[in-house]
């Protein structure tokens, strides 16, 4: 039984289908990423789970409850917004305490309700109960914001605002934590730190988390499983390593990491080795295929670049270097092979020289590293 | 049924209530006026729903519907005259206002005008003064025993310099007290029009005045025409000046409509006049929107640059003198009212015989109630319009409620006297007999001033992003709770800005007060009006001064607020 189950979710916006039959089964305590380019429907999927959009058809289950008809405020989904959506007229403490106030509001009689409302307008007028205060301070301590509790949110840095948004969602002990591109407003360096912070927090609290992002690096480095979306459909769901080494479509091969994608035609299949023709070259692969036209996918790091003709691999070609880019630990070569261009990443060892433009080289790829789709 | 239940959340109920409010107090009254213009007698709209008998009567009335009233517009010379006179008055006023404003606006925007600050400050005086007080001020200046008349006769003139009780008198009052409505938009137009175009003209050899006539002036023409239409509408629906100054033989639409209702109880006649007023005002509003929306001053601008101010004394000094004379008239009018309010007696002399504070004392002992009424009614209208406009702007911005948006702009085109007549007709009889209560008065005030408030709150609402509200909802708040705890507090600046405007305009309000206020709820404006009718000029003057001071104080508070915000 999954913590979040989405069955056949379809969403139309005035006749335009933005989600087509989405199926998800997210496990308890899993960190699940929805990855895709902008406009692919990942945010809409999340907003359907949160209840801000009504599905045109399909079912959404949280735990064992079907929530299709449940208002968003009754779903107990903690949400972290791309813009953080902190309440600008409240300080950090009041922001975090908001959901606790609401909970109290629901339980109280009219007189107490007035007290809670007053506190939400100005927390100086009506005091927080002790246990509520403790709970907020605990969460603030967890995100290392204890010292900032009484600052206005506008006085905080981007990273601190992000942590307030996180704390505000966590304090309600949500059944699912939903995060919509939470890192996109941070600078490069902070983004890396926050990735670790969020991942660690998720591991500590074992909280089921759905994370929406367009950044494949973010999704791959944080999530237990990733669903790659395009044009309102899910293309593939898998662990990051699975997606990387076994992409089921050229789009994923290209979107998740970098790939050389070449069109080929099937020649023969013998003794577990498939031979495919690309232009006037032949290439061998261990992938089985029954298609006539295939896409040949080779990751750049799986191509060996050698100066001499000492290749022992089954696949070896001749190429000419067009561009060489030095990237610190690696060197990226863009080469012309026949009518095609290939990218190869090689490890740079100090003392080695970088091959220059126009240099003739031999390339080798082992058949295990050649993928046919 | 299930669908209905789904919509009956807290916020859904409020939306229904809003629609109910607008239908009850805006749509039905206007529709009723339309029907009455055929039936010639008031129909009991609400009674028809609860009593078969009333329903039968209403149906009978509808069966006897005639087009007589519509024919009478063209046959009854009273009505036709009223329409033509009103149109003529508004046309003359808007043309003259334009002619007056062009040099002053140019002076303020583009020249080193001597005493520019003083002149600008004095230009706001007319905006503070309710028009019936201006009209009354003209009576005590230009009337038979006015000091202007004294001076005129002392200089050898015969009779009156200008008869205040005439179309000319009304036009003059409106011109001198409405010109600021046109002045400030025109100043803005002169300020933003691209100075580099003028420099180009000069560069090609055109002299200063030639540049003005061929480049500067043509560039602000769209802005000017648009403001002329505004003045036309303001003059057309103005009730204060005509009701005080129009002689019995002068028919104007607003006055005629008032007389039909208050004098003859001629419901059909009042209804047809109301329809005409709404039609004309609506047409002007439509033309203004259709032709000039978004095409005004910004269309003629490149980048607004710091313009070089014209320092030519031959230009600035005449403009300063001219502006001085224009702003001096309203100032003298108010000074005259002030002198009258502290005069023992003031006959046909340049100055009063003696001075006293007795009139003020009398007001504070015997007419304190009117001041209280004004404040209570204005506060009531304020609270009502805040509540309505906050929710209206929520629905307009978040749920694209086009109908609500439209309904809040309708009061803009319905002249006060027309709206008053519509309300009286609709709520005159049981079961919903509200005419003569404070409640209908407050409702009328707030609906009339709602456009100001809604404009202000919609602006603020647009600046509050939708995800802030969604954040509150995801944290467990219902839409209503989110509105109360998040949206509400964030809207306070917008509410504050609109509030003072509503409060001030309600205190100044004339047409609704005179037409609808019952004796026990008489606000200051009605008290002053009645004093003028009874020729109790001294207490009218004192009360007018109190009203103007009250408005001034509120205006000062408003300025303080807006300055704080912009800091």
Image (cartoon, helix red, strand yellow):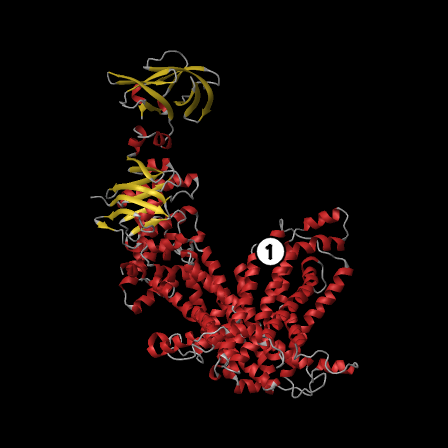
Q: Residue B553's x, y, as percent?
A: 56, 72
Q: Residues within 10 Å of mark 1 (few under 14, many from 20)?
A: many
**Residue name at image x 60 percent, y 87 percent:** B358
Q: Residue B527's x, y, as percent?
A: 54, 82
Specify whether B218 is left or right of A115.
right
Specify whether A123 is left or right of B136.
left
Q: Residue B176's x, y, as percent?
A: 66, 71
Residue found at the very far right of the displayed protein: B156
Question: Which quarter of the picture shows residue B468?
Answer: bottom left
Specify whether B267 is left or right of B480.
right
Identify whether A316 is placed above or below B150: above
Foreground pick, A154 / B186: B186
Dividing the image into 4 quarters, which one contains the N terminus of chain B? bottom left
Foreground pick, B17 / A156: B17
Identify whether B364 is placed above or below A328: below
Q: What number of labels is visible?
A: 1
Identify whether A326 is placed above or below B235: above
The chain ID associated with circle 1 is B
Q: Is residue B329 visible?
A: yes
Foreground pick, B20 / B203: B20
Specify whether A159 is left or right of B97.
left
Dividing the image into 4 quarters, which one contains the C terminus of chain B? bottom right
Q: Which residue is mark 1?
A: B296
Mark 1 residue element: loop
Q: Is residue B330 visible?
A: no
Identify whether B395 is placed above or below A111: above
Q: Residue B525's x, y, as percent?
A: 54, 79
Question: Which quarter of the picture shows residue B188?
Answer: bottom right
């Amino acid at each position: 039984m999954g913590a979040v189950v989405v069955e056949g979710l379809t969403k139309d916006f005035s006749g335009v289908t933005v989600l087509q039959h989405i199926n998800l089964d997210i496990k308890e305590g899993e960190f699940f990423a929805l990855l895709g380019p902008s406009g692919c429907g990942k945010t809409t999927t999340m907003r359907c789970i949160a209840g801000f959009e009504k599905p045109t058809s399909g079912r959404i289950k949280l735990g064992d409850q079907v929530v299709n008809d449940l208002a968003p405020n009754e779903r107990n989904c903690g949400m972290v917004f791309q813009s953080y959506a902190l309440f600008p007229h409240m300080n950090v403490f009041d922001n975090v305490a908001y959901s606790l106030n609401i909970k109290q509001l629901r339980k109280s009689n009219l007189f107490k309700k007035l007290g809670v409302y007053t506190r939400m307008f100005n927390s100086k007028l009506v005091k927080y109960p002790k246990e509520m205060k403790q709970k907020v301070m605990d969460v603030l301590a967890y995100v290392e914001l204890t010292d900032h509790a009484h600052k206005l949110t506008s006085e905080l840095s981007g990273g601190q605002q992000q942590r307030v948004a996180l704390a505000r969602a966590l304090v309600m002990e949500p059944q699912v934590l939903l995060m919509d591109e939470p890192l996109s407003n941070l600078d490069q360096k902070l983004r890396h730190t926050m990735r670790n912070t969020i991942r660690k927090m998720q591991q500590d609290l074992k909280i089921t988390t759905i994370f929406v992002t367009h950044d494949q690096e973010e999704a791959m480095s944080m999530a237990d499983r990733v669903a790659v979306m395009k044009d309102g459909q899910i293309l593939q769901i898998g662990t990051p390593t699975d997606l990387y080494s076994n992409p089921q479509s050229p789009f994923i091969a290209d979107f998740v990491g970098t790939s050389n994608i070449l069109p080929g035609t099937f020649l023969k299949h013998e003794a577990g080795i498939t031979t495919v023709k690309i232009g006037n070259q032949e290439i061998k692969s261990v992938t089985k295929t029954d298609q006539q036209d295939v896409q040949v996918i080779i990751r750049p790091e799986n191509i060996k670049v050698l100066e001499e003709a000492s290749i022992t691999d089954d696949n070896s070609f001749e190429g000419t270097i067009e561009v060489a880019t030095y990237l610190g630990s690696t060197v990226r070569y863009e080469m012309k092979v026949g009518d095609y261009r290939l990218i190869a990443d090689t490890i740079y060892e100090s003392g080695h020289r970088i091959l220059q433009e126009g240099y003739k080289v031999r390339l080798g790829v082992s058949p295990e590293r050649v993928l046919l789709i | 049924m299930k669908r209905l239940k789904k919509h009956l959340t807290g916020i859904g109920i409020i939306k229904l209530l809003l629609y109910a409010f607008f239908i009850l107090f805006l749509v039905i009254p206007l529709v009723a006026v339309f029907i009455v213009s055929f039936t010639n007698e008031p129909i009991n709209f609400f009674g028809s729903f609860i009593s078969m008998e009333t329903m039968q009567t209403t149906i009978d009335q509808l069966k006897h519907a005639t087009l007589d009233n519509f024919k009478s517009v063209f046959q009854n010379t009273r009505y036709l005259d009223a329409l033509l006179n009103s149109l003529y008055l508004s046309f003359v006023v808007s043309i003259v206002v334009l002619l007056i404003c062009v040099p002053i606006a140019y002076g303020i925007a583009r020249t080193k005008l001597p005493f520019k600050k003083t002149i600008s400050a004095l230009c706001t005086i007319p905006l503070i003064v309710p028009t019936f007080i201006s009209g009354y001020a003209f009576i005590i200046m230009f009337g038979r025993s006015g000091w202007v008349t004294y001076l005129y006769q002392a200089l050898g003139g015969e009779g009156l310099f200008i008869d205040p009780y005439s179309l000319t008198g009304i036009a003059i009052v409106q011109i001198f007290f409405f010109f600021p409505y046109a002045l400030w938009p025109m100043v803005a137009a002169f300020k933003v029009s691209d100075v580099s175009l003028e420099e180009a003209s000069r560069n090609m050899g055109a002299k200063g005045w030639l540049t003005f006539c061929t480049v500067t002036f043509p560039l602000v023409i769209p802005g000017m025409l648009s403001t002329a239409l505004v003045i036309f509408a303001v003059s057309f629906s103005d009730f204060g000046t005509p009701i005080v100054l129009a002689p019995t033989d002068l028919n104007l639409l607003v006055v005629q409509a008032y007389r039909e209702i208050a004098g003859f109880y001629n419901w059909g006649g009042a209804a047809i006049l109301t329809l005409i007023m709404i039609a004309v005002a609506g047409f002007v509003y439509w033309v203004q929107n259709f032709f000039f929306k978004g095409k005004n001053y910004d269309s003629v601008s490149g980048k607004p640059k710091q313009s070089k101010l014209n320092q030519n004394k031959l230009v600035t000094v005449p403009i300063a003198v001219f502006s001085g004379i224009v702003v001096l008239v309203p100032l003298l009018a108010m000074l005259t009212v002030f002198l009258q309010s502290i005069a023992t007696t003031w006959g046909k002399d340049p100055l009063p015989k003696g001075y006293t504070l007795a009139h003020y004392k009398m007001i504070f002992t015997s007419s304190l109630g009117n001041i209280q009424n004004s404040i209570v009614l204005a506060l009531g209208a304020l609270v009502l319009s805040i509540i309505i406009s906050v929710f209206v702007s929520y629905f307009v911005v978040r749920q694209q409620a086009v109908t609500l948006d439209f309904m809040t702009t309708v009061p803009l085109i319905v002249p006060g006297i027309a709206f008053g007549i519509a309300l009286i007709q609709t709520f005159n009889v049981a079961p919903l007999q509200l005419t003569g209560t404070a409640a209908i008065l407050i409702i009328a005030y707030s609906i009339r001033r709602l456009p100001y408030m809604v404009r202000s709150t919609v602006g603020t609402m647009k600046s509050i992003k939708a995800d802030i509200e969604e954040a509150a909802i995801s944290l467990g708040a219902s839409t209503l709770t989110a509105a109360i705890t998040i949206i509400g507090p964030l809207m306070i600046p917008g509410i504050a800005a609109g509030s003072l405007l509503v409060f001030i305009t309600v205190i100044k309000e004339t047409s609704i007060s005179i037409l609808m206020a019952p004796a026990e709820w008489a606000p200051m404006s009605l008290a002053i009006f009645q004093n003028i009718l009874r020729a109790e000029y001294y207490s009218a003057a004192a009360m007018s001064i109190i009203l103007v001071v009250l408005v001034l104080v509120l205006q000062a508070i408003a300025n303080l607020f807006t300055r704080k915000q912009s800091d």
